[in-house]
Structure formats: C-alpha cells, structure tokens
C-alpha cells in the first residue's frame, strides 16, 4: 500500500513538473513575441515587482500609459 502511495506521489510530482515546464515555455515564447518596450515594461512589473508609478518614473512615462500598456499586454496573453 505504501509503495502505491509513493508511486502516485511521484506521478503527481512529475505531472506538476511537466506543467511548470510547459508554462515556462509559453511565458518565454510570449515574452519573445513582445516588442522590446513591452517586454521591458512587463519584466519590471511582473519580475521586478515594481509599482506602476515606479515604472512610469523609471521609463519617463505617465502612469496612465503604463497601466494601458500592461492592460494591452495582458489582453494579448
């Protein structure tokens, strides 16, 4: 019985790892298709966890423009 549970746990773990790899590949492909400007903005927001105001200041843009671009990026996802 314990052996069956261990095997099931391994299968669930492997399935989880495969899904993570597929998700990572999808995100990389999506990022590769973005323009350089959109990629930079998405990177700052999602990976560097910067606020919209901080991104706007850093990129010398209005915060409304940053919000709009993030909205467009999410819609294209």
Image (spheres, grey):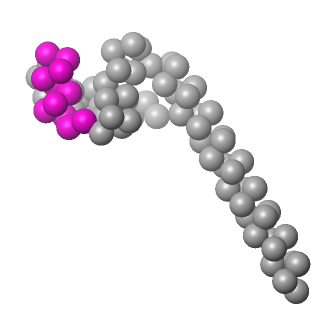
Give residue 57's position: percent from left, percent from top.
13, 23
Q: Residue at x 66, y 41 (%)?
A: 21
Q: Residue at x 14, y 16 (%)?
A: 60
Rendered view: 60 above or below 70: above
Residue at the outermost bottom position: 1
Q: Is residue 59 magenta?
A: yes
To which quarter of the image does residue 67 belong? top left
Relative placement, left or right, of 70 versus 19 is: left
Q: State whether residue 24 appears in this view.
A: yes
Q: State whether residue 64 appears in this view.
A: no
Relative placement, left or right, of 50 versus 24 is: left
The N terminus: image quadrant: bottom right
Between 27 and 49, the one lying in front of the other is 49
Give residue 37's position: percent from left, percent from top.
33, 15
Rendered view: 62 above or below 74: above
Label total for image? 0
Residue at the outermost top position: 36
Between 67 and 16, the one lying in front of the other is 16
To which quarter of the image does residue 2 belong? bottom right
Relative placement, left or right, of 48 versus 18 is: left
Decide whether the magenta segment is chiefly helix, strand or loop. helix
Relative placement, left or right, of 56 versus 11 is: left
Q: Residue at x 16, y 25 (%)?
A: 56
Please report the bounds of the magenta region as a residue range. Answer: 50-60
Rendered view: 37 above or below 72: above
Q: Residue at x 73, y 64 (%)?
A: 12
């Amino acid at each position: 019985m314990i052996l069956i549970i261990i095997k099931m746990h391994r299968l669930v773990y492997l399935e989880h790892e495969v899904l993570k790899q597929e998700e990572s590949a999808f995100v990389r492909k999506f990022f590769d298709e973005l323009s350089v400007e959109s990629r930079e903005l998405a990177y700052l927001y999602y990976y560097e966890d910067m606020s919209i105001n901080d991104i706007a200041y850093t990129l010398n843009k209005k915060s409304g423009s940053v919000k709009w671009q993030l909205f467009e990026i999410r819609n294209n996802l």
